[in-house]
Image: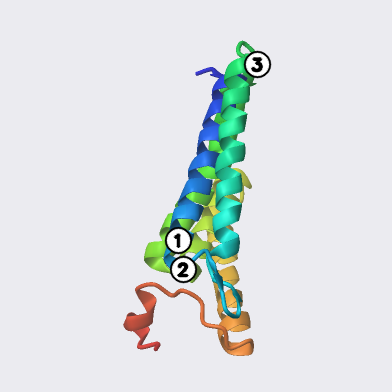
């Protein structure tokens, strides 16, 4: 697998343009005009979104016209594998957090990264992940009184 710089410049330009368009279109629901008490809630996000979309478009056109780096490698296979090993568990953490809550997601993420990437023994990695989840609960839920996403644990333990 070879990824060229030119292709990545086009992908990033397209994603930037898309993010700007989504921001601008989403802010239309909030109102983008000027009310009697000042700017409406969508005023600044709208113009930031338009600016992002314009700059993303500019970068895409510039990449197409300049044709610089069209043969230059962006990432080699071995580097892409290292990046996937780094970002894969993080993406799984985000997905697990959405469905299982922050405490379970953090415990599983730390267990996996300590075990597979840190080369800790499984029982020590499990203690590390579980201990961190308990510390998160104590600090945020008990000390700061800030509820974090608990997922299915909330109804299971009767937590409101």
Mark 1 surroundings: few (<14), some (14-19) or many (≥20) residues within 10 A: some
List x then y, in percent, for residue 105: 47, 63
Q: Earlier in the sequence, mark 1 or mark 3?
A: 1
Instruction: Give the mark nearest the N terminus, 2 or 3.
Output: 2
Residue with the mark numbered 2: 30
Q: Report helix, strand or loop for mark 1.
A: helix
Q: Residue 134: give x, y in percent of width and height.
A: 56, 76
| Residue behind mark 3 | 66
Q: Would you say 157 lies left or right of 68 here?
A: left
Residue at image location 57% in from the left, 28% down from the top: 60
**Residue annotated with mark 1:** 28
Distance, label 2 to label 3, CA atoms, is 39 Å
Report whether residue 76 is seen.
Answer: no
Q: How far apart in space, not on screen, are marks 1 and 2 (Cα)?
A: 5 Å
Across and down, in percent, residue 104 comes to 46, 67
Label 2 environment density (alpha carbons within 10 Å; few <14, some 14–19, many ≥20): some
What residue lies at 57% left-to-right and 60% top-to-bottom? 45
Q: Specify whether residue 131 is in view.
A: yes
């Amino acid at each position: 697998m070879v990824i060229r710089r030119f292709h990545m410049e086009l992908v990033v330009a397209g994603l930037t343009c898309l993010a700007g368009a989504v921001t601008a279109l989403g802010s239309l629901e909030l109102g983008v005009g000027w009310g009697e008490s000042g700017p409406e809630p969508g005023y600044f996000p709208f113009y930031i979104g338009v600016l992002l979309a314009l700059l993303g478009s500019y970068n895409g056109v510039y990449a197409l016209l300049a044709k610089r780096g069209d043969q230059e490698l962006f990432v080699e296979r071995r580097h892409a594998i290292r990046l996937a090993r780094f970002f894969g568990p993080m993406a799984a953490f985000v997905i697990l957090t959405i469905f299982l809550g922050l405490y379970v997601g953090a415990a599983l993420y730390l267990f996996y990264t300590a075990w597979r990437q840190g080369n800790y023994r499984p029982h020590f990695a499990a203690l590390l992940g579980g201990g961190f989840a308990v510390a998160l609960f104590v600090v945020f839920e008990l000390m700061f009184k800030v509820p974090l996403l608990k997922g299915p644990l909330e109804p299971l333990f009767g937590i409101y």
